[in-house]
Image (cartoon, rainbow, N blue to C red):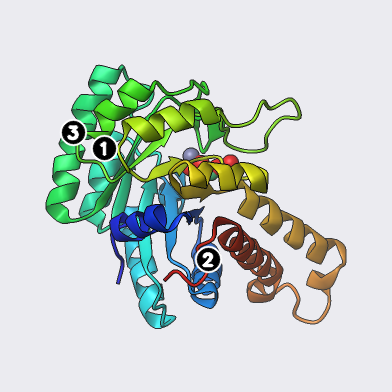
Amino acid sequence: MLVSAKEMLTKAREGHYAVGQFNINNLEWTKAALQAAQECNSPIILGVSEGAGKYMTGFKTVAAMVKAMVESMGITVPVALHLDHGSYEGAKACIEAGFSSIMFDGSHYSIEENIEKTKELAALANEKGISLEAEVGSIGGEEDGVVGAGEVADPAECKMIADLGVTMLAAGIGNIHGKYPENWKGLNFEVLAKIQDATNGMPLVLHGGTGIPDEMIQKAISLGVSKINVNTECQLVFAEATRKYIEAGKDLQGKGFDPRKLLAPGAAAIAASVKEKMEMFGSVNKA
Ligand code: G3H
Ligand code: ZN
């Protein structure tokens, strides 16, 4: 059964750790992430971007696949299926499709329009008992066609959005999607502290979780971050492990070209990476 992210994030906020959101792209990705969560006895949020949803032939397919896998794999840890950086229409479609959590990313709208749309979706999500993530400011870089200017969030605007009945809030604090550049200035903890004060205990979300040093992760958690999103890292380790397998010519030996063999090293690399992040975020044994 899929659950809303509300309870797992409230517990994480109170227990001073964070739950990882790991983006999925296909069955192997999902299986690896679920296996890692079960082995770590950790709650998990499976993120689905609109692009990944399309790739998997639609949100209904994704919801059906994830629900069936949770059941058939005997997964007992809490699992939330979450729309990542959703549009207004995408958020509605995921509610319809049976997702247990959604993100409405209204960061590219004016604050007035962001408030209006977030408020409407909060009412819908609350009625269905699913969790809602909203965004203020923006995350730098690009993820699956979602491009952000990296605008640092205004704590007063964060309060306005947090007060609309959302479950969690993503705020731009200098974080970036994809790899961090050499000259990256780091997370803006001064602003994060102000956002924490302004939002009264709301679980905060840190996007761009690939490549943020451990000390910064721990400091962000101490300032109210309870959910950390990771996407690029799993793609990088999957690609590297697959490349190594092919470069070693293993796909040419025996039945090494069998997709179940060919995709196995990449899937194992994803599972290892998810486990490492769960350790780092402190969510191991918190199911
Ligand atoms: O929304 C998803 C994330 O913010 C992932 O960021 O690809 O840099 O790990 P990342
Ligand atoms: Zn993101």
Residue farthest right in this picture:
248
Label 2 with label 1: CB-CB less than 8 Å: no
Q: Is mark 1 within 8 Å of ligand 1?
A: no
Q: Is residue 277 above or below residue 263?
A: above
In the picture, residue 188 is in which quadrant?
A: top right
Q: Can you tell which of label 1 and label 3 is closer to the viewer?
A: 3
Q: Amino acid at mark 2?
A: Ala
Q: Quadrant of the N terminus?
A: bottom left
Position of 269 compared to 127: left or right? Answer: right
Q: Is mark 2 within 8 Å of ligand 1?
A: no
- Considering only order in the chain, which callout, 1 or 2, is on the residue closer to the N terminus? 2
In the picture, residue 110 is in which quadrant?
A: top left
The residue depicted at 87 percent of the width and 66 percent of the height is 248
- Disc 1 to disc 3, C-alpha distance: 14 Å
Position of 79 compared to 190: left or right? Answer: left
Q: Amino acid at mark 1?
A: Glu
- Disc 3 to disc 2, C-alpha distance: 32 Å
Q: Can you tell which of label 2 and label 1 is closer to the viewer?
A: 2
Between 226 and 131, the one nearer to me in the picture: 226
Q: Which residue is mark 1?
A: 89
- Considering only order in the chain, which callout, 2 or 3, is on the residue closer to the N terminus? 2
Mark seen at residue 33: 2
Q: Is residue 57 above or below residue 79?
A: above
Residue 64 percent across, percent down from the top left: 32, 66
Q: Which residue is mark 3?
A: 119
Q: Quadrant of the C terminus?
A: bottom left
